Image: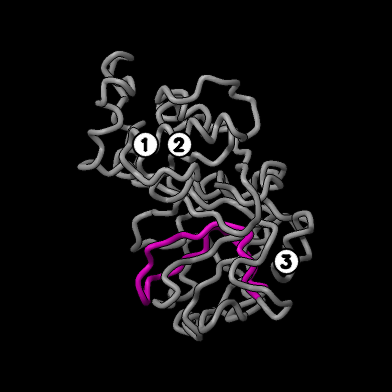
């Protein structure tokens, strides 16, 4: 589940209407189960450079190409990020400050990328460090920013931080997130486990509904929206598309027991999310319907 309700308050990053997926040799994949902000993930001192106030684009092998998501000025390259990996900082023509963390040190030199250089959408920037295995993406609105910001557990989001969810969805041309609290309640209601108000905050009633869904789906029952739960619910939602209410009701079993052999991410263009940071349960306001409704829009 989300780790900070403050993510609900962040505005969506705008930017290019169709930014390029930065990993052209990697199938779009990122998980919806860890949404957050409010603390430096894996970092407990002010010496940390990686703060995880954004989205991880996962599944990238060593040496995978990294592309510029849109036209931009390179304001930092080969900057410190995590142990062994580096980051690029871009100020886009559309007004975003974009952080891409997870580069192999020095890989930008292969493409002649330097600080102060203008790059075009789709230009090669460098390569992924295999031990990191992903590119971490953060988005800010700023005309002067030169680095990302700390978001400590007890503090509000840093000035200018934007929610990158819709931005990344535009890269892959689909809307399949289950990040917002209301979206998760809608998903549980669609599957027949939640009977309450869809505008309610996450609480005891929704937790019990989630536990009931977990039990019926045959996964660990802990009342938390983790990776196993995300996949199972996506699978169940994909399964009931085109079914009648009776055929796909939880009591019939068809919506909750027949998903093991089908991949929910393939059913929804194999897109998932992993947005990281944070401290409490909630979601990210993205104004999207649940995956099955998004296909109908």
Residue at image x 42%, y 48%? 272
Magenta stretch bounds: 49-75
Residue 236, quarter of picture: top left
Which dot, 1 or 3, sits closer to the camera? 1
Which SS class for mark 3? loop
The answer to whether 151 appears left or right of 215 in the picture is right
Disc 2/disc 3 C-alpha distance (Å): 36 Å
Asked if marks 2 and 1 touch (Cβ < 8 Å), the reply is: yes
Mark 2 or 3, nearer chain start = 3
User: Image height check: is 98 above or below 178?
Assistant: below
Disc 2/disc 1 C-alpha distance (Å): 6 Å
How many numbered discs, if any? 3
Q: Which mark is residue 211?
A: 2
Q: Is residue 27 magenta?
A: no
Which dot, 2 or 3, sits closer to the camera? 2
Q: Which residue carries the number 1 mark?
A: 215
Which SS class for mark 1? helix
User: Image height check: is 237 above or below 122?
Assistant: above
Q: Which residue carries the number 3 mark?
A: 149
User: Image height check: is 92 above or below 267?
Assistant: below
Which SS class for mark 2? helix
Q: Which mark is residue 204?
A: none
Residue at image x 59%, y 24%? 198
Residue at image x 25%, y 37%? 259
Q: Position of residue 85 (x, y in %)?
A: 52, 79
Disc 1/disc 3 C-alpha distance (Å): 40 Å
Taking depth in this image into account, of 164 and 25 the one nearest to the observer is 164
The answer to whether 1 appears left or right of 242 in the picture is right
Residue 61, quarter of picture: bottom left
Q: Is residue 226 visible?
A: yes
Q: Position of residue 44 (x, y in %)?
A: 67, 74
Q: Is residue 54 magenta?
A: yes
């Amino acid at each position: 589940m989300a780790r900070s309700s403050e993510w609900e308050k962040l505005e969506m990053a705008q930017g290019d209407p169709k930014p390029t997926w930065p990993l052209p040799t990697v199938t779009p994949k990122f998980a919806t189960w860890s949404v957050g902000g409010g603390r430096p993930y894996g970092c407990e001192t002010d010496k940390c450079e990686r703060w995880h106030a954004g989205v991880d684009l996962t599944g990238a092998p060593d040496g995978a190409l990294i592309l510029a998501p849109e036209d931009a000025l390179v304001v930092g390259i080969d900057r410190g990020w995590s142990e062994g990996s580096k980051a690029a900082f871009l100020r886009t023509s559309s007004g975003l400050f974009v952080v891409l963390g997870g580069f192999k040190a020095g890989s930008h030199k292969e493409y002649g990328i330097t600080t102060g250089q203008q790059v075009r959408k789709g230009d090669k920037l460098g390569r992924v460090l295999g031990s990191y295995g992903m590119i971490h993406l953060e988005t800010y609105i700023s005309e002067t920013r030169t680095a990302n910001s700390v978001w400590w557990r007890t503090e509000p989001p840093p000035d200018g931080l934007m929610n990158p969810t819709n931005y990344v969805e535009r890269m892959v041309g689909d809307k399949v997130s289950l990040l917002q609290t209301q979206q998760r309640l809608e998903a549980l209601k669609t599957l027949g486990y939640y009977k309450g108000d869809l505008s309610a905050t996450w609480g005891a009633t929704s937790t019990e509904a989630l536990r009931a869904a977990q039990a019926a789906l045959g996964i660990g029952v802990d009342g938390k929206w983790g990776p196993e739960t995300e996949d199972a619910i996506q699978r169940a939602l994909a399964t009931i598309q085109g079914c009648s209410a009776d055929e796909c009701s939880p009591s019939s079993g068809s919506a909750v027991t027949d998903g093991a052999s089908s991949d929910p991410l393939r059913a929804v263009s194999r897109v998932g999310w992993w947005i990281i940071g944070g401290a409490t349960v909630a979601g990210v306001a993205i104004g999207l319907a649940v995956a099955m409704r998004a296909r109908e829009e």
